[in-house]
Amino acid sequence: MAIKSTASYSSDFIVFCFVAKTRSFSQAARQLGISRSLVSKRVSRLEDRLETRLIHRSTRSMSLTEAGELLYRRYSDITDQLDRAEREVADLHRTHSGLIRLAAPTVCSYIGMPLISQLHQKYPNIEVQLMVVDDEVDVIQSGYDAALHIGPLKDSNLICRKITTAKLCVCGSPGYLIKRGVPTTPNDLKRHNCLSMTPQIGDEKMWLFREAGEKPFSVSVAGDFQTNDEVILLRACLAGLGLGQLPKVLVEEHLESGELELVLEDFAHIASDIYVVLPHRDMPEKVRVAVDFLTDRVRNRFPPNEAP
């Protein structure tokens, strides 16, 4: 009963506002598509509920009482706020502006920073909040607008788009390779200082390889430096500490500059796909243009068809 009463009260209030706006029971009835007598009945019922008169009636004219003017003025304030809120919500969906919350693993965050700079140049009103998350992200529960993920997705029902493929490679600094020599087969790594990715100390370190068209195989490696952060491992390679097995997308600019050199290229055919994961298919325009922009830039620099 309470719900019905509240609904009736809301309906009566809307009818009163039409009368107050048009200053006419007849015009309010025409705009609402109901009879004049029903308009009068609704206004009277609202007055009874509020225990105050809202409208002065006569056979020739009508006017609002002080209470009626106050109530209608409050209504105008509310409708203005609702209109403003509606426009802001619509603008969020239509325009290239506002905050975008992104989650990405360390590798994607590192290679993505120059691209985010380019995004800001093209869409200066888009604000980016980038969180580094190396585990798979629940984009719906977490509230992110999009998340990047490397490797197989656990949930096959996720809304995702493959961006490119990250192929592992082995690299080292020119200074290290001059001093220690260039390995020509994975077995040569036994004579090298291999810098490893590991969250645990003391476990055997294994690097995975595959020749084109062959099955993957692993090689036990050893070295005097381990870390759980691929960017730190990259820095260690740049500093000449040893060899590292890293995603090529991470080291590409350092290969181009000559700071690092590739080794064992014939055996570097292990790769993982990179995906962008979305909470909904119907994206706000700011998210759509940002995702499209970043995806296109990554694909242009690291084409998916280069992967094995």
Image (cartoon, helix red, strand yellow):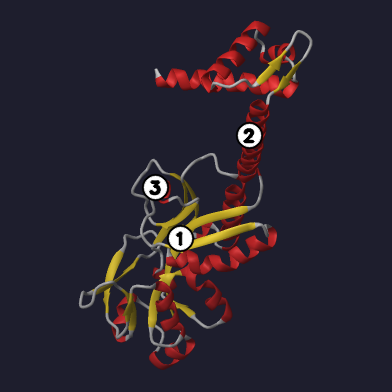
Q: CA distance from mark 2 to mark 3?
A: 38 Å
Q: Earlier in the sequence, mark 1 or mark 2?
A: 2
Q: Is residue 256 visible?
A: yes
Q: Residue at x 52, y 68 (%)?
A: 111
Say left or right for 48 vs 123. left
Task: Identify the image quadrant of the N terminus.
Answer: top left
Q: Secondary structure at mark 1?
A: strand
Other residues around mark 1 within 10 Å, as few (<14) / some (14–19) / many (≥20): many
Dot label at residue 74: 2
Horizontal and vertical percent position of residue 93: 61, 43
Dot label at residue 104: 1
Nearer-the-camera pick, 78 or 205: 78
Labelled pair 1, 3 in contact (Cβ < 8 Å)? no
Labelled pair 1, 2 in contact (Cβ < 8 Å)? no
Q: Is residue 249 visible?
A: no
Circle 1 or circle 2, nearest the eye:
2
**Amino acid of disc 1:** Ala
Nearer-the-camera pick, 79 or 273: 79
Label 3: which residue?
A: 141
Q: Is residue 237 above or below residue 108?
A: below
Other residues around mark 2 within 10 Å, as few (<14) / some (14–19) / many (≥20): few
Q: Earlier in the sequence, mark 2 or mark 3?
A: 2
Nearer-the-camera pick, 151 or 113: 113
